[in-house]
Image (spheres, coloured by chain):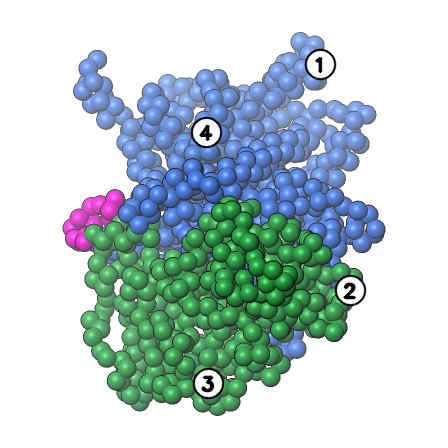
Chain colours: A blue, B green
Amino acid sequence: MTLVARASAATRRPLTWLTVAVLAVLIVLVALPLLGLVRATLSDGAGDTWSEVLASPMSSALFWEPLGGSLVVGLGTGLLSTLLGAFLAWVVVMSDVPGRKAIAVFATIPFALPSFAIALAWESVFRNDHIGGNPGLLASLGLAVPDWLAWGPVPVVLTLAAHYYSLSFVVAAAALANVGGDLVAAAELTGASRLRVAVRIVIPAVAPAVVSGFLLAFAEGVSNFAVPALLGLPVRFQTLSTRLYGAISTGDEVRGYVLSILLVLVAAVILFAGNRITRNRSYSTITGKAARARTTRTGGWRLPLAAAAWAIVTVTAILPGIVLAVSTVLRRTNSLEGGFTLHYWTGASDPSISQGMRGILRDPIVMQALGGTVGLGVAVALGAVLIGALAAYVVRHLPGAPRAKGLIGLLSYVPFLIPGVALGAAFIAQFGAPVGPFGSLYGTFAILVLAGIAASLPFAFQTATTSFGQVSAELDEAAVLTGASSPRRFGRITVPLVSRGLANGGVLVFVTMVRDLSVVVLLVTPATPLLSMMTFRYASEGFTQQANAITLIIAVISVAATLLARRLGDRTDRSTS
Amino acid sequence: MSALRTRVRPALAALLPLTLCFGLAACATPGADADTDDTTDWGSVGHDELVELAEEEGEVVVYAFTSRIAAVEESFEAEYPGIDVVASDISSSELITRLASEHAAGTSTADVAYVSDAPVVVTELLADGVLVPYLPARLADVLPEEYREPLVANRLSTKVLMYNEEAHPDGSPVSNLWQLTDPSWAGKVVLVDPNVRGDYLDLATELSLRADEMAAAYADQFGEELVLDDGVPDAGLQFLKDLYDNEAVLVDDTDTVNAAVGAVGQDDPPVGFTSYSDRRDNEDEGWALQVASGVAPSNGIVFPAYLGATENAANPAAARLLIDYMMGDDTETGGAGFDPFYVAGDYPTRSDVTPPADALPLEELGAWEIDAETSAEHRGDVADFLLTIQ
């Protein structure tokens, strides 16, 4: 077949057009902002920023050492999160450990807490006298806490993993739930040991989910700024994210952009490596024969496993949640000495407390912001899941075209790594001027939604990829025989089967949007108050209790959304199986 | 930041809005979409006329780096009921990026900016004409020269050396900055990493710009002339290198400095560079922060908060009226427009407003006043130097 003939055959396939559409959206939302960064670093005024960063007397402190720091943090966070998340997913889905349902709820909470909350909880226990001020719990009991345990890479990795294992848990649990009991039962009939079943059947079947969870935790780990800044800086432990935010906030934006482009390249290498692990194998576990996941009897291990699982969720979800809640009723910031008060929630203005700031529940803007935040979260979640699902579908089903697929995969993975303020600036440049007959989107709710979708695509895409990977082609082929059209097959067969995975992706997107600030900060107007903006406002003026109270509201909304999505997911499960 | 100025024609813009304008590289023609062709000489418009014009506009949009703008909004709207204030508060660096991007895209933007990070304002906003100055005529006699240019400043904030007055009831334990490089202060000096926050980079830059004073203070302290290390350009940077080598603790946030230095009940608390005005939270937070005065050659810096109108302001008269309002009136405390900023440890710029009583007068504080334009030229080099001594 000639090239022309092939091309014309391709244009007759709807899938080709879908691919083009997906690529077009990704190019507008992700590639162009990224290209904008590249152009800014190459323009006249940028001088020789690239050589300053890569080969100059300061490159060591500016790039190479922070690169090492980022790799330690990213890989450490990714691996530890995967380990914790996969373990809990197995406990919740496949074991007979008591309290599984509650563990499943608690395991999603850490992601809904702000990353600095867990870091602050770490400090309140392990802080030593390195920087002065009030010591942590251990030091005040007279125990000497070494610097490596109080500050630097060890606490940074541990606290980030405590935060992001939720991602691995959500993705792995959804995948495990689809590993049919029949597979496991068949293997057990052959006399295989439980370990052998796990290694040969269960783990390979969920490998793509495990890789997806790792990739998400890695990207979150390397892009996180708050935790390395809080726990790393005191011992001069730097990562690329602390360096790039530092460059941007001290007015050297071009240097920050160069660092973020380099961070994108690092992530691309990790993505490529991750995809190689799962390439060219089939992971379909959803076949025509639906079967419930099989519970493994853990016998004598039942209680030790339960203890381990409960310990993980207690330390990462329950205790930080309690610390956060208590911090909102402390009269004096982070100190029990001042006693307790509900003033920061419900109090009227009192000039002697936080400069006369009234309790947050008395502030009408908080209620307005609550509505705006939920609306934005839902709109972004729907949009991101739609695009993420279409992108994942195209990558799985389009024959050939490895470059287009690779590009879709990459563009769907890197948005985390574009600094929010740079993404916002790029959106102003793109949508600030009127586009054709549509007028300017700038200053509207729509541009917030678009920016949110761009920033949260990785969650939607990775969860969708995992879900689609599990749907067996035989179902689709059977439907072809009945004469069902392609959109009909997609709507009636594929979508219901992947709905649980997509709902999970939607929740992750929603949670990210309701608590994230950096993406929208350049685009919001006072007409659309958001809760995350209010936490910033309070925190930057030193009103810690009010900021934490809003954070707690955000966490409660996030957990509610998670529970709601699970309920919906269970309902669709019943209707299709 | 380069100014890649490309005129984008509307038809082309419709097809390729994305390939030509990127990030912060300025494109389109500044002012192309402005609602007004503003050639008014605002300096010659009297106050009553300004109010009349502003009331016709009916609205003013302000971006501010502090949430205290909410109080300004409330009192301004009470004073001028016909004018709606729309206030956004975001951090200075985000505010600067946002204004520059909006200006480049020719889109709707704020009318007024209230912004700190003075040196960055000079390079990112004033150089490209994003902000324009407005000096209300009534201030001619009461606003000293240095607070009129390049934009008017309504108050000064500080980053100065502070200590724990509970542990040191007899006054500052430090009388010369160079003492902080002595082994007795090893690991006992806390500051926010100047490579992370602009105001601390301004502090580091000022130390370098005041190299002669730093060298003299060295001689006073140690009785011998300072000898610079290889590759260290001046005495101020030598001080920073010695401070870093003396295990100075870098943190991410001024509140972390406050808690480390100020927390009561410490036997051997560190000293640190932070905002004098945070002393007002001592009782609320259980701190004992006090400023170290009488430090040779200086205890830190004071720097301005700027008020400017945007070049493309949709409400140019209301913008000027708000700036005028926030500059305060001639009462002792500056009146309602200045009230949210009348805080001990910050300093009003107007010579006729009495500084708050609970803080040292500016002349006794002994901090260096930064010059935004000089600092802007120099701070990139200082940031680079700091990266070589980590």
Q: CA distance from mark 1 to mark 4?
A: 37 Å
Residue, x 55% and y 65% (percent of image)? B216
The one nearer the camera, B70 or A226, is A226
Segment tinted magenta in the rendering: B7-20
How packed is label 4: few (under 14 Cα within 10 Å), some, or many (20 or more)?
A: few
Q: CA distance from mark 4 to mark 3?
A: 60 Å
- Residue B265 marker: 2
- Which chain is indicated by disc 2? B
Q: Contact (CB < 8 A) between labels 1 and 4?
A: no
Element class at badge 1: loop
Residue A313 in view:
no
Expressed as whole percent of the image width and height from the top left, the position of residue A278 reads: 50, 22
- Residue A193 marker: 1
The one nearer the camera, B227 or A501, is B227
Q: Label 3, on which residue?
A: B351
Kind of residue at disc 1: Ser
Q: Contact (CB < 8 A) between labels 2 and 1?
A: no
Element class at badge 3: loop
Q: Label 4, on which residue?
A: A269
- Which chain is indicated by disc 4? A
For marks 2 and 3, the one nearer the N-term is: 2
Residue, x 73% and y 30% (percent of image)? A96
Of labels 2 and 3, the one closer to you: 3
Q: CA distance from mark 2 to mark 1?
A: 61 Å
Expressed as whole percent of the image width and height from the top left, the position of residue A67 reads: 51, 37
Total tally of numbered discs in the picture: 4
Kind of residue at disc 4: Val
Of labels 4 and 3, the one closer to you: 3
